Amino acid sequence: MNRTKKQDWFTNYLSSKGFWVGGSAVQFNSKSEASALQTIRYFKSNRPEFLLVYILEFIDPINRTNNYEEVIKYYESKLMFKPQFTLAIWPNQSMVFAVYESGRLYKDLDTPKVLNWFRKYDPDLIGSTSYLKPLNKSFTDFFHLWARKHMKGFQNDIDAYKMRNNKVHMFELKRPKESSKTWKPYKADSSNYIQFSNLCRQMDWQLTNIAYNEKETGILKIFNQVKIHNNTLQYNTSAIELRLDQDVLEIINELKFVIEFSDR
């Protein structure tokens, strides 16, 4: 099974415009062996609040001479909001984990110990689920596969965000194979849209859902305020033909939206 391809014309554009992009690589310095792929995941079970976890998947096997506490602290400091804790993973090292929380690194953790960290925030996140959505043809990251075996409740990753004028602007990205001009969101994904909207409301973040085809450079479908209405998805939508020298946030701010429905 292949890893989900995150890099395309739009994620490259977002990176060039200063957005944080999930699945991107981070490097401590040019000589460091502590390069990692970064994601942020949010979790929700029965508690009203969400759990935010920053996840670093280190590319190289663990090197005992590296000061990983310094490295992880550096990576976490670049975020524009603070997670409850950071989870470090060395997937090439027979599932070695570490947790960085409140300025302290807890090293050489195994699966049960990591699950205890999640259990501390919400016990209902731990355990197998009665319904496990089938995997697509690819997986997001190592944690995605690991969590399917050990965790339940709602979880998803953050695709991209940027701070502007003291406001965090969150982007949820959909990459349909069909043209974004004809694509409509699926009812099966309604919980993703609604839960992310709830998280953004709690955190006072600005949320924008964006669909695009990686073969249609510059073509974006914007859709917001997704909700269930008479067993269909209702949302406000608008289209963009983006030049790569333009500021996507400025364009979104000036859009005029129309109501659209999807019964897919």
Image: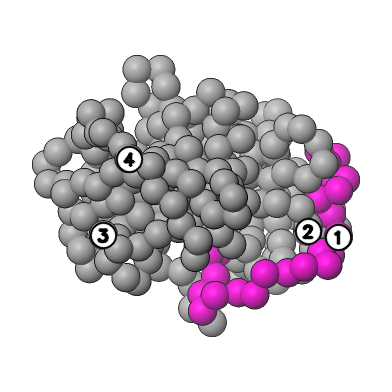
Residue type for callout 2? Met
**Marking on residue 239:** none
Percent position (x, y) of residue 208?
Answer: 40, 39
Residue occupied by mark 4: 258
Q: Residue furthest top?
A: 165
Residue type for callout 3? Lys
**Which numbered disc, 2 or 3, marks the residue that appears first in the sequence?**
2
Q: Secondary structure at mark 2?
A: loop
Marks 4 and 1, Cα distance to the nearest angstrom?
42 Å
- Using the rendered view, name the quadrant where residue 161 is placed: top left
Q: Are marks 4 and 3 in contact (CB under 8 Å)?
A: no
Marks 2 and 1, Cα distance to the nearest angstrom?
5 Å
**Which numbered disc, 4 or 3, marks the residue that appears first in the sequence?**
3
Camera sees residue 212:
yes
Question: What range of the chain is rendered magenta?
Answer: 117-141
Q: Nearer the viewer, residue 55 or 241?
A: 241
Q: Residue furthest bottom?
A: 1
Residue occupied by mark 2: 151
Residue type for callout 4? Val
Marks 4 and 3, Cα distance to the nearest angstrom?
14 Å
Residue visible at 38% across and 42% down in the picture: 259
Marks 2 and 3, Cα distance to the nearest angstrom?
36 Å
Percent position (x, y) of residue 138?
Answer: 51, 75
**Marking on residue 181:** 3
Tell us which disc is closer to us: 3 or 1.
Answer: 3
Most common SS among magenta residues: loop
Q: Are marks 2 and 1 in contact (CB under 8 Å)?
A: yes
Q: Secondary structure at mark 3?
A: loop
Marks 4 and 2, Cα distance to the nearest angstrom?
39 Å
Residue visible at 16% across and 49% down in the picture: 241
Q: In the picture provided, is 151 more to the left or to the right than 68?
A: right
**Which numbered disc, 4 or 2, marks the residue that appears first in the sequence?**
2
